[in-house]
Image (cartoon, rainbow, N blue to C red):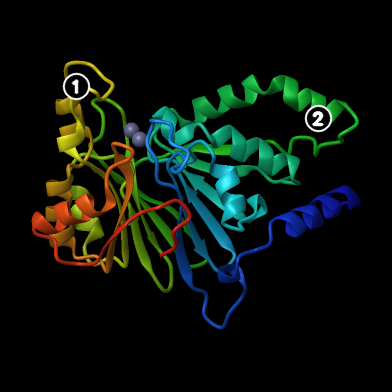
Amino acid sequence: MNARVAILASLVTATLPVASHAQPSAKDSTVVILLGTGMPVPNPRTQGPSTAILYGKRLFLFDAGSGVVRQMSAAHLSTAQIESLFLTHLHSDHILGVPDVIFTSWVFGRSAPLKLYGPAGTSRMTEHFIAAFAEDIRARTEGLEGAIRNGYRVRARDIRAGIVYDSAGVRIRAIPTPHNVGIPAFAYRIDTPDRSVVISGDTGPSDVLLTWARGVDVLVHEVVNMSRIDGRFPGGADIKTYMRTAHTPVEKLAQIAARTNPRVLVLTHIVPAGTSEPDMIKGIQAAGYRGRVAFGHDLDRF
Ligand SMILES: [Zn+2]
Ligand SMILES: [Zn+2]
């Protein structure tokens, strides 16, 4: 570590203290942190979709919606902790924060390539992001800021379903999900030595996901309240059909949860924004799920 990197690292540590969960302990514990529970409609209380898994000090991000890096700061997570970033799919609400992760981590001292995994198109998208920021890269490396040359680099990989990551006790599986016709999308199952977590990403009801989510400790799942998808909701004439098939209605999610029986079902990417929390919980219970369910809020931990 050169002197400049050391100063930057201490700066990051000073401004972004590592969360108490990240302190070494006799037994590393796995924590799920909702960085953003929102959907495309801008809402100041819900940032773009992103979920963090913290295992000891090791940080894994799933999706990077808008606001992701500031939410990390609010959760006392440092960009220096990011071990890998995984994308569920390439809809803009899930990737608007990717350049933020790439470039902010670089400005704060990243020198190794960021590891980024996602469906087909991820590598090409990353090349475009890097190209779009050419002037910023030039200014920071050729001017007086002295940014780490090549520190903005990303090792992006287009993945297929199956085990996509297996390192030092953390195993991550990509599960294909039905989201939008012709657009590949994945849920992820994360297994650490002490916990199992499934993050659905955006998905219609899926039997494949159900198989992998059976009995997990935490099931983080998207949900749509179809009774609120009416003429006021943006979209074309097919919006109801789209919402019913590309996303998971409350009643379907209740069935999935009843069949998978997670220790806790956590709702995220709640459509539409502003859905009433008691109504959503009651809807899931009325549809037959009696297990523990949590309406996810930004920065909640499980
Ligand atoms: Zn989405
Ligand atoms: Zn989507």
- Residue 36: x %, y % from top left: 45, 46
- Residue 289 against residue 95 in the figure, above or below: below
Neighbor class of circle 1 (other Cα within 10 Å; few <14, some 14-19, many 20+) is few
Neighbor class of circle 2 (other Cα within 10 Å; few <14, some 14-19, many 20+) is some
Quarter residue 129 falls in: top right
> Which quadrant: the C terminus?
bottom left
| Residue at 81%, 37% in the rendered image | 147
Closer to us: 241 or 47? 47
- Residue 176 against residue 279 in the figure, above or below: above
Q: In which quarter of the image is ligand 2?
A: top left
Q: Mark 2 points at which residue?
A: 140
> Which quadrant: the N terminus?
bottom right
| Residue at 22%, 16% in the rendered image | 236
Q: Name the residue under label 1.
A: 231
Name which of mark 1 and mark 2 comes first in the sequence: 2
SS at mark 2 in the image: helix
Amino acid type, label 1: Gly
Closer to us: 266 or 103? 266
- Residue 272: x %, y % from top left: 29, 36
Q: Residue 191 carries which label?
A: none
